[in-house]
Amino acid sequence: MKKRLVIAALAILLCVALLGACGSTPLEEAIIGRWQCEDTTQPHVFLCTLVFDANGRFSDADGDPGNFTIDGDTLTLEFDDFFLAIEATVQIRGNRLTVEGELLGEEFRIILTRQ
């Protein structure tokens, strides 16, 4: 009887663990692709097109490439050709990417959609 209870408890724990693991896609995978702003009147219009690849590379609207990393909900963009790194909080819901942060002393919030 004890053996059956232990097996049943382990089966329940395994089901709970599998359901939790299947419920969401890691941000590192979900961000891969091309994202475009609907509002291109943003002060930081170069961020209105972002293309992320699976190798940790990105490019912006001007075609400037760089590396990106994600730690939790923090996205860091490090450009190849100039000493500009942008750290921002990101959130993906459906096909909408929200990027919020500060650049050159100015706060920004950009909403992009997957293309």
Image (spheres, rainbow, N blue to C red):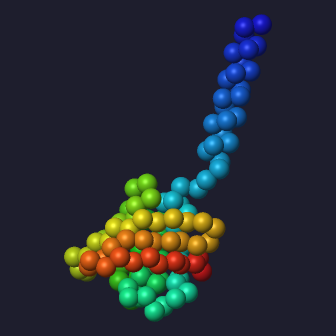
Horizontal relation, residue 108 to residue 10: left or right: left
Establish if 32 lies above or below 13: below
Horizontal relation, residue 75 to residue 18: left or right: left
Horizontal relation, residue 78 to residue 8: left or right: left
Is any atom of residue 80 visible in this view?
Answer: no
Question: Which percent across, then down, holds residue 19?
Answer: 68, 42
Establish if 112 lies above or below 88: below
Horizontal relation, residue 31 to residue 23: left or right: left
* Residue at figure coordinates x 62%, y 72% from the top left: 95
Q: Quadrant of residue 99?
A: bottom left
* Residue at figure coordinates x 52%, y 84% from the top left: 37
Of 57 and 73, the residue lying toward us: 73
Establish if 16 lies above or below 105: above
| Residue occupying the far top of the picture | 1
Q: Quadrant of the N terminus?
A: top right
Question: Which percent across, then down, holds residue 40?
Answer: 48, 91
Question: Which percent across, then down, holds residue 83?
Answer: 22, 76
| Residue occupying the far bottom of the picture | 41
Of 64 and 93, the residue lying toward us: 93
